Image (tube, rainbow, N blue to C red):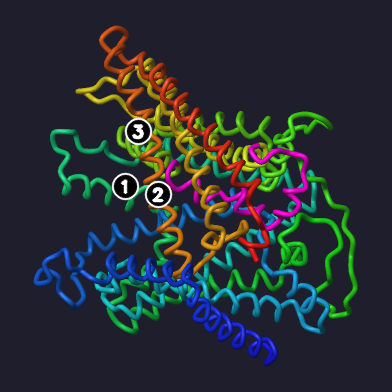
Amino acid sequence: MSRAFLFLLIRSWKNRVLSRLRRLRNPRYLISALAGLAYLYFAFVHEPFIHRSEIPRETLPVAPGARFFVETLFACMLLAVVLFQWFFSSIRTQLFNEAEVQFLFPAPVSRGALLNYRIGKAQVGIVFGTLVSFIVLGRGRFFPNAVFALITIWAVYSILYLYRVAVLLVKQSLERQGAKGRQRKAWVLAAVLIAAIFLSASARRFYPPPPAPGHLTPENLFLWLKLVVETGPVFYVLSPFRSLVQPAFATGLSNFIQRFIPLALVIAAIYAWIRRSNAGFEEAALGQSPGGEVPASDSGSGTRRVIIRKPRRPPFQLAPKGFAPIAIYWKNLSLAGGLSLQQTIPALAALSIFAILIARLSGEQAPMIIGSACASLAGILTLMGPIIFRDDLRTDLKNIDLLKAYPVPGWGIVLGEVLGPATVLSILQWLLVLLAAGALPSLEAHPWKASHRIYVALGAAMLLPCLSFIGILVQNAAVLLLPGWIHLGREHQRGVEAMGQRLISGIATLISLVIAAIPSTVLFALMWFVGYWLIGLAIVPIAAFVAAFGLLVESVIGILLLGRLFEKFDPSKELG
């Protein structure tokens, strides 16, 4: 890396730290930082609620079998992250901001120097994530050597970052190839699906049945899981990922160096491929789809090249005239990744049915694990989804002058803004509910008939989106009432202050959901007690419909109130 880039990185890090310290004078950031630090301290550092005498300060001994299980758990997490990045990462991820592209790309610097600068800049987030993960994992007390664990976590995070950049470049290259690139994507997806089918079908051949319910002890379950991981195709699939986490469990320096070699080779291989790749580095710089005018980066001549940009597919066809909030809704769905409703919903339904079939072929325990995980994720998404998906007033309040110029009443603006994230959340929740209802097996004490699955799934499919909609309204109400306390923009902030803001926002959303759910809960309970003895579980979708109607009435009242707040909102006073 050149001295100029090194100087730029050092000054950027220094200015970033100083700016974060200076803005602590603002109560918004000070309270958020204190909340984030308090959460980290009381959750992972301070132990006042546990007997201190029972917690040794030295490294806790871990049995070899348990260590193997922990390695396998981390390997499964890495495999999930790798697959998620490939199939769900957006090609519009931004590697360089606009200022860096305008000043650095036309400069007489090589592509390798630009890449080194970007990797060095990313080390701030990687180091912060490494420290937080190290604290969460017990400050190294569950590893033979805390320093080895810290270095391994940093290296794994660096690999994941380089892999994300490589995936972005590959997707940009495939996007430029048009039909040929889409064909290659389809081949990759087909290979993954065939591998999943093979692993599921071979489960009964390679692995013994799980322990019977009468012998389901922790020891028997652990031995069965260890046998599954150590034999058959699963062993070969997870072995590369296990090798990435094994240096954290090294017992000595020589053993650590020996185990760290594969990890270092992976870093070097991905880095070398990125440097030598001919993928669309310039398009990936700004996170744009291939096409348009972008600066060249290799020659330093400042020349530009023009590629014909493929138009982005709209979520649905927008009529020239119609209900005005639909246009805002259409725009927010487009920002959410070009979500095409006509194709996304059938594709997700087909994927859910395929996943249910795989779960059914994988033995007796897999349906329980997959179904329980999907049900839990649906509940978590109901609470955290309104905070994660931000394509509403939290993004558009930066353009408040333009919004106020629209000939649309305030409630129409609010309705169009909140419908975008509500649609994305609803589709994800319906997918998880379908997977949970189809995968969860029947229990001996509680038979799980097909009709029971339909009743419960319909009830959850009606209630969960309505609860999420209330949460989205709460987040948008916070923007209009306390705009100085809410981060504006699509990007998610990082750091202790951001952690504290999300913690406060999550608690406020949870309290608001509990209060808003009280009338609907009463309605659901009344319908349940009246109708259960008449028609049994068939009352669930009816009671859920009545409760969902109550939540929708509250939502309508909330939209009208937020519309008035939007009309009275003064950008010159609230946003400076």
Q: Secondary structure at mark 2?
A: helix
- Disc 3 from disc 2: Cα separation: 47 Å
10 Å crowding of disc 1: few (<14), some (14-19), many (20+): some
Give yes or no for contact between labels 1 and 2 (Cβ–Cβ under 8 Å). yes
Q: Position of residue 525 (x, y in %)?
A: 30, 22
Residue 156 seen by the camera: no
Q: Is residue 538 above or below residue 121?
A: above
Q: Quadrant of the C terminus?
A: bottom right
Q: Position of residue 147 (x, y in %)?
A: 34, 81
Residue 487 found in image quarter: bottom right
Earlier residue among tags 1 and 2: 1
Report the span colored magenta: 382-411
Q: Is residue 544 left or right of residue 386?
A: left
Of the pair 342 and 252, the residue shown nearer to us: 342
Looking at this view, is 87 or 437 the one in front? 437
Give the residue at mark 2. 234
Q: Residue furthest top?
A: 534
Q: Is residue 199 visible?
A: yes
Please say whether residue 237 is one of the residues in the magenta stretch: no
Please report whichever mark, 3 or 2, sits nearer to the chain's N-terminal start: 2
Q: Amino acid at mark 1?
A: Val
Residue underneath mark 3 = 518
Measuring 27% from the left and 16% from the top, which residue is drawn there? Answer: 529
- Which residue does the numbered mark 1 point to in the structure image? 228
Residue at 74%, 53% (x, y): give it.
174
Three-letter amino acid code of the residue under disc 2? Val
- Secondary structure at numbered mark 3: helix
Q: Is residue 281 above or below residue 84?
A: below
Residue depth check, mark 3 versus mark 2: number of the one nearer the observer: 3
**Residue at x 38%, y 23% (from the top left corner):** 456
Identity of the residue furthest to the left in this view: 53
